[in-house]
């Protein structure tokens, strides 16, 4: 479990293809002494497991499914990625609940400056947009952000200077794809509402608990 607050950025030192998957070696400013084999770490929002570590960095294994479903399959040596270690129970939940399980990808359409702030507009498939609401949360490449606008074809976010300067968003160009994880609570609500008559939300159920107006 993660918060979407990026700790630091890492650099891909090596990408080795394995049997259907890939092993990545990453260097970063994360304290090696605090890492352990088997712990979870979010790499551009994708929950991966530390396979090994040394003074040069740490290695993670990326499964075939993750390569197909996320932007990691297109990463090359030298690319920068966002890193966040797993949430501890003693931490403040300053972002939002992020699982590290990517729902899909969106395409950056435009980058527009607005004073000290930056607006990013994305195109996204309907399956992602269905769980988005204005002022709701979304994780883009692992970054916890607030949805500024959403319509039938895409959505936008407004980035503060700190986020732009401390994540990979500063390097993103129109046409590039990013990893999207929708708000977990929103996904559960959407499924509940779409579950139909077999236990779903009906007018009768709403009336029973006084959630409709007469």
Image (cartoon, rainbow, N blue to C red):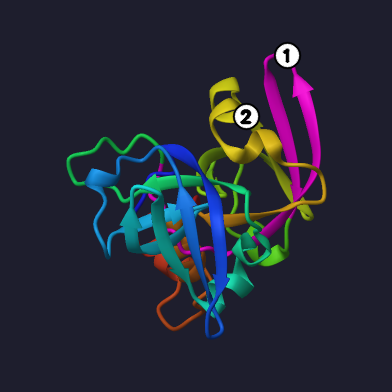
- Can residue 63 be seen at all in this image of the molecule? yes
Q: Residue at x 26, y 35 (%)?
A: 92
> Picture coordinates of residue 30 (x, y %)?
36, 40
Q: In whole angstroms, how far apart are the C-alphas of marks 2 and 1?
A: 11 Å
Q: Quadrant of residue 49?
A: bottom left
Mark 1 lies on a secondary structure that is loop
Q: Earlier in the sequence, mark 2 or mark 1?
A: 1
Extent of the magenta region: 96-123
> Crowding near pointer 2: few (<14 within 10 Å), some, many (20+)?
many
> Picture coordinates of residue 202 (x, y %)?
48, 70
Q: Is residue 97 magenta?
A: yes
| Quadrant of the image containing the N terminus | bottom left
Mark 2 lies on a secondary structure that is strand
Which of the labelled discs sits on residue 115, or is there none?
A: 1
> Crowding near pointer 1: few (<14 within 10 Å), some, many (20+)?
few
Nearest the viewer among 165 and 90 is 165
Which residue is outermost to the top? 115
In screen coordinates, is 38 left or right of 72? left
- Can residue 185 be seen at all in this image of the molecule? no
Q: Report the residue marked by disc 2.
A: 159
Task: Work out whether 197 lies above or below 167.
Answer: below
In screen coordinates, is 70 left or right of 209? right
> Picture coordinates of residue 46 (x, y %)?
49, 59
Q: Is residue 197 magenta?
A: no
Q: Residue at x 75, y 41 (%)?
A: 121
Nearest the viewer among 4 and 203 is 4
> Picture coordinates of residue 157 (x, y %)?
65, 37
- SS majority, magenta: strand
């Amino acid at each position: 479990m993660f918060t979407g607050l990026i700790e630091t950025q890492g650099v891909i030192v090596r990408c080795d293809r394995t049997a259907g998957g890939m092993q990545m070696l990453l260097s970063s400013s994360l304290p090696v002494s605090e890492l352990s084999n088997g712990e979870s770490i979010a790499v551009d929002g994708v929950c991966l497991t530390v396979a090994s570590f040394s003074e040069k960095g740490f290695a993670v294994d990326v499964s075939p499914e993750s390569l197909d479903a996320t932007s990691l399959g297109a990463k090359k040596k030298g690319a920068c990625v966002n890193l966040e270690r797993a949430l501890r129970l003693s931490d403040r939940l300053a972002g939002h609940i992020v699982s590290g399980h990517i729902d899909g990808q969106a395409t950056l359409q435009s980058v527009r400056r607005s004073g000290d702030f930056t607006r990013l507009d994305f195109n996204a498939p309907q399956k992602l947009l269905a769980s988005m609401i204005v002022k709701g949360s979304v994780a883009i490449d692992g970054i916890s952000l607030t949805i500024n606008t959403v319509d039938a074809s895409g959505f936008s976010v407004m980035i503060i200077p700190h986020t732009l300067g401390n994540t990979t968003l500063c390097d993103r160009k129109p046409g590039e794809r990013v990893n999207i994880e929708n708000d977990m609570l929103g996904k559960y609500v959407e499924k509940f509402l779409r579950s139909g008559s077999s236990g779903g939300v009906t007018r009768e159920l709403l009336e029973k608990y006084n959630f409709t107006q007469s």
